[in-house]
Amino acid sequence: MGSSHPHPLPNPTTSAGADGLAAFLARPGKAVVALDFDGTLAEIVPDPEQARAHPRTLPALAALAPRVASVAVITGRPAGVAVRYGGFAGVPGLDHLVVLGHYGAERWDAVSGTVKAPAAHEGVASVRAELPGFLDRIGAWRGTWIEEKGRAVAVHTRRSSDPQAAFEALRDPLNELAARHGLIVEPGRMVLELRPPGMDKGVALTEYVREVGAETILYAGDDLGDLPAYAAVEKLRSDGHPGLLVCSGAEVPEIADRADLVLPGPAALADFLATLAATAS
């Protein structure tokens, strides 16, 4: 799949990242590749329902997956939605792909093609009912809108006249609303998501790495919700598991500054994964 002349592998800018990449290439069969979806495998778009994996993503993953222990997509989206928007079902080479949706609360396995999920948190239903009137009462900026996510609900400000001001104005009120219903707020790029506590990408990644018995971890993300996964990789590194932290795009400095390797976005990440597949022995 892809070009017969792969791009050269970029060099991580940290010694820990260089060690992680070297360990990955030495024993790819002992590595887990974990990836965020929006902004990492798919470009950020004004309407999240229009998000789709970059065209080069699937060929790259299908080439890489058979060479590694596992590929896991870890996303705040429902697992089934990520599978649909990613086009992950029924792809040759992706037989063992796993999608950990809702930050790991849901799981889709390509082998079975089914989603496993616990019961929903009752606070989400309460917030969902209250949110439209709540936003109206506090005079939320025009252009904010609500995204229904099943086990969570999100308020987007990207379409408002001043997205950053709307985002900042909503932070405290939404934190108070979430706390009243036993939920937490997960901030992202012009989005505030109200969801149950206790599960994040770090917990999901750590549990999955243990389940697979991986030695090396590559994680790629782009937004604040990926910080727990970054912290999990740093903890795994301190416990003797080499790891490589990749950032897709540089819009969120909290992620870019902690990454071992910053790539310009989903297209560059797809090319990087394709090159890894071609280079991994």
Image: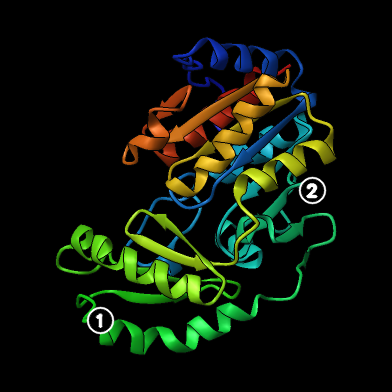
Q: Residues within 10 Å of mark 2 (few under 14, many from 20)?
A: many
Three-letter amino acid code of the residue under disc 2: Asp
Residue drawn at the location 44% of the way across and 46% of the way down: 224
- Percent from the top left, x then y, of residue 133? 34, 90
When the figure is inspected, residue 150 is found, relative to residue 186, above or below; the finding is below
When the figure is inspected, residue 264 is found, relative to residue 216, above or below; the finding is below
Residue corresponding to mark 1: 138
> What quarter of the picture does the N terminus occupy?
top right
Residue drawn at the location 76% of the way across and 70% of the way down: 118
- Percent from the top left, x then y, of residue 175? 41, 66
Q: Residues within 10 Å of mark 1 (few under 14, many from 20)?
A: few
Residue 249 in sight: no
Give the SS element for disc 1: loop
Residue corresponding to mark 2: 95
- Percent from the top left, x then y, of residue 86? 57, 56
Distance CA(mark 1)–CA(mark 2): 48 Å
Asked whether, in this view, residue 222 is left or right of residue 80, the answer is left
Q: Nearer the viewer, mark 1 or mark 2?
A: 1
When the figure is inspected, residue 263 is found, relative to residue 8, above or below; the finding is below
Task: Work out whether residue 22 or residue 129 is closer to the camera in this orientation and state it.
Answer: 129
Q: Earlier in the sequence, mark 1 or mark 2?
A: 2
Give the SS element for disc 2: loop
Residue drawn at the location 58% of the way across and 42% of the way down: 35
Three-letter amino acid code of the residue under disc 1: Ile
